[in-house]
Amino acid sequence: MNRIIQLILIICAMAMVSLASCQSDALARGYRFYQRHDYDRAISTFNRVISDNPDDQKKRKVAYLGLALCYMDLKKNQEAIDGFSEAIIIDKEYSSAYINRGIIHVRCDSYAKALEDFTIAIKILEKYYQEASTGSGSYDEKLTYIRDDLHRILYYRLMIYLHQEDYAAAFEDIKSIIRISPGNAEAINNYAIMLSSCPDDKYYNPKEAMIWANKAAEMVTSGKANKNDMARVFDTVAGVCAENGDFSKAISWQEKAISNCQDEICMEKYQKSLDDFKSSKKVRVDLKEAFSQWLKSKAIREPDLDRK
């Protein structure tokens, strides 16, 4: 009798392991459907994981995130917000849910709500970043993706601040980005643009901008930047030279930008700037227009299944 009971217990344990494995596979399958843009099957799979796991909050929160991402891609904004909100109810520190809900709020022109979500996400990521910074080995990869997310969301928030003309907050965010990613030429280049183009005299500083623009140029020249990235930085250096009244250097740098540019739209812009420099005209970046361009071009990285 004892052997029969033991056998039944083993079979039950195996069945539970098999069920757990099946649910885990279902979650991964849902994300595969999502990544293939097969939204109907992805939504169906995520809903099934949610209904089949009333007590497994980790699976449920990831399923709600996947469900919301599907609705996000389908431009069903309220359904997406609802899904991200359900994930947040389960886990108050689920940064991916805050980030993506914030992006939906930006899409809906609800900038105050977007700022709130991005700010919460930044606080969460900063805490994780500090925790990961004290680790070693396996923490290296975790530190990299946390830093990447933190950099990205700080930039999102910065762009909203520029749109709202809150330059004090915007400059704090660009400085934070550079602090966590000191080797990022794009961030340094953006700082130079802000310093040389800010309409608020309190923050407009073309001389300091020249230091940062030259630093960005050194980085892309000595690193592995592609030609378009190099062109963008050289265009910035040229603009900063013009802001400082050195149109001869501005022309030289702008010609370098044109020689590296492989994008027709940018080429047209760079050529116009060159003509302006030859006429001793300054060319400032419209920081509010930069927000509009960001809305058109921003990319949202797909989350990993086991990420916070």
Image: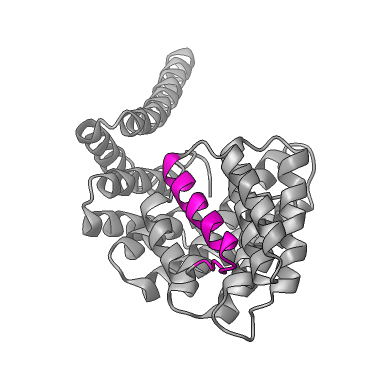
Work out whether residue 90 can be spotted.
no
* Picture quarter with the N terminus: top left
Q: How is the image coloured?
A: one colour
Number of callouts in the render? 0
Answer left or right for 231 relative to 111.
right
Taking the magenta stretch, the answer to whether it contains residue 270 is: yes
Position in image of residue 236 (x %, y %): 62, 57
The span shown in magenta is: 264-285
Q: Quadrant of residue 12?
A: top left
Residue at 27 percent of width and 34 percent of height: 42
Give residue 62's position: percent from left, percent from top: 41, 45
**Residue 2 x %, y %:** 48, 17
Q: Give the camera-side residue of 270 and 101.
A: 270
Q: Is residue 225 magenta?
A: no
Classify residue 43 as left or right of residue 198: left
Horizontal relation, residue 22 to residue 279: left or right: left
> x, y percentage for residue 8?
41, 19
Comparing 113 with 290, the one in front is 290
Q: Quadrant of residue 169?
A: bottom right
> Visible in this render: residue 306?
yes
- Main SS of residues in magenta: helix
Q: At 31% across and 61% down in the image, what residue appears?
A: 107
Q: Residue furthest front?
A: 279
**In front of the other: 104 or 66:** 104
Q: Along the line of sight, which residue is nearer the eye, 136 or 60?
A: 136
Q: Tell me if 136 is positioned left or right of 95 in this view.
A: right
Residue at x 68%, y 39% (from the top left corner): 141
Q: Which residue is found at the position 25% from the left and 41% from the top?
A: 47
- Residue 173 falls in image quadrant: bottom right
